[in-house]
Image (cartoon, grey):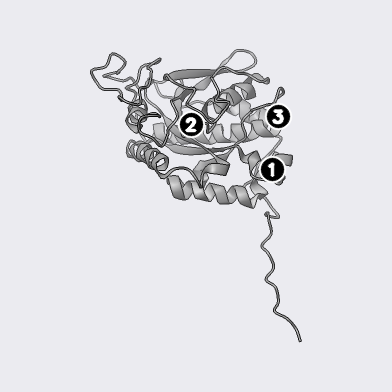
């Protein structure tokens, strides 16, 4: 008498990576980004705006990007060290320079983090105004009172340089499924406006090394991890962008030396962003 055959458990991870990555391409990626040309007469550097919930790793990604190009750990943007309030209070532009102090052809902007309660985090209206180039450098965000057009920090006639050329949502891998619906809706409101303006939208999924031993032990296994693919699918379903616009990254948190694999993942995301921005310019959206 044979008992019921047990259904085999699906494998924890994939046998082959589902995205191709050249883990030796760091220097090539750096040179491609350094020499990136987009040929727009009114823009010297294209602008990437990071937004997302408090503690997602927005400021940390800026510091990690600086670290990649400097070849050493850099801390410039203020980072949130605990799950408290947003460290970022003002609208600030971060230029990226390489080890020879050559300036890269893009800048990163950080904004105050989104929170569930209306009175705590940045309002979507302020992020949308930043997208459109209406927010002056140094503007201090006020959750209780979004920027209005009569405010001295409101740019009435933004130049192409003032506008955002790619919107990036930064979300932590482990908590995307549990993120408050109110925060998701705020992010979707901003995404909807970006899409209506033709601005590309990318998601950076941070803290991927918290999703289990496979990737924690070896980042090059990122695209073999079933958990990471599942979380990327959740990002796509909850926030809206297709999978091809979602990039898992691992920021520098406690390291004192740079790491080739972390660098490659960050550079791959930035290269994709640069490509989307070039398409945006070529489509005549700005």
Q: Mark 1 or mark 2, which is nearer the start of the sequence?
A: 2
Q: Which residue is the site of mark 2?
A: 54
The part of the image, by quadrant, that contains residue 186 is top left
Q: Which residue is the site of mark 3?
A: 259
Provide residue 211's location: percent of width, then percent of height: 64, 44
Q: Is residue 245 left or right of residue 165?
A: right
Provide residue 63's location: percent of width, then percent of height: 58, 23
* Secondary structure of the residue carrying numbered label 3: loop
The part of the image, by quadrant, that contains residue 51 is top left
Q: Judge depth for marks 2 and 1 and give the one in front.
A: 2
Q: Is residue 167 visible?
A: yes
Judging depth in this view, the residue of 47 and 82 nearest the camera is 82
Q: Residue at x 75, y 83 (%)?
A: 2
3 and 2 marks in contact (CB < 8 Å): no
Q: Is residue 85 left or right of residue 261?
A: left
Label 3 packing within 10 angstroms: few (<14), some (14-19), many (20+): some
């Amino acid at each position: 008498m044979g008992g019921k055959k047990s259904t085999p458990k699906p494998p924890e991870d994939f046998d082959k990576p589902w995205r191709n990555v050249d883990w030796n391409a760091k220097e090539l990626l750096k040179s491609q980004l350094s020499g990136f040309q987009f040929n727009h007469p009114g823009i010297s550097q294209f602008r990437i705006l990071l937004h997302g919930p408090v503690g997602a790793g927005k400021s940390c990604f800026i510091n990690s990007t600086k670290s990649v190009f400097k070849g050493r750990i850099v801390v410039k943007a203020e980072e949130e060290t605990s799950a408290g309030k947003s460290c970022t209070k003002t609208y600030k532009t971060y230029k990226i320079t390489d080890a020879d102090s050559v300036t890269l052809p893009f800048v990163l902007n950080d904004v105050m983090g989104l929170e569930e309660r209306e009175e705590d985090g940045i309002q979507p209206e302020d992020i949308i105004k930043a997208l459109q180039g209406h927010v002056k450098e140094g503007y201090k965000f006020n959750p209780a009172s979004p920027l209005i057009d009569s405010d001295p920090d409101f740019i009435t006639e933004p130049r192409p340089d003032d506008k955002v050329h790619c919107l990036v949502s930064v979300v932590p891998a482990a908590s995307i499924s549990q993120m408050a619906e109110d925060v998701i809706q705020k992010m979707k409101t901003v995404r909807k406006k970006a899409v209506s303006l033709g601005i590309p939208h990318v998601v950076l999924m941070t803290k991927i090394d918290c999703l289990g031993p496979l990737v924690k032990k070896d980042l090059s296994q990122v695209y073999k991890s079933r958990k990471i693919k599942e979380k990327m699918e959740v990002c796509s379903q909850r926030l809206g962008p297709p999978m091809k616009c979602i990039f898992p990254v691992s920021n520098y948190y406690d390291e004192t030396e740079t790491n080739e694999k972390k660098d490659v993942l960050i550079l791959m995301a930035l290269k994709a962003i640069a490509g989307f921005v070039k398409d945006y310019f070529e489509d005549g959206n700005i």
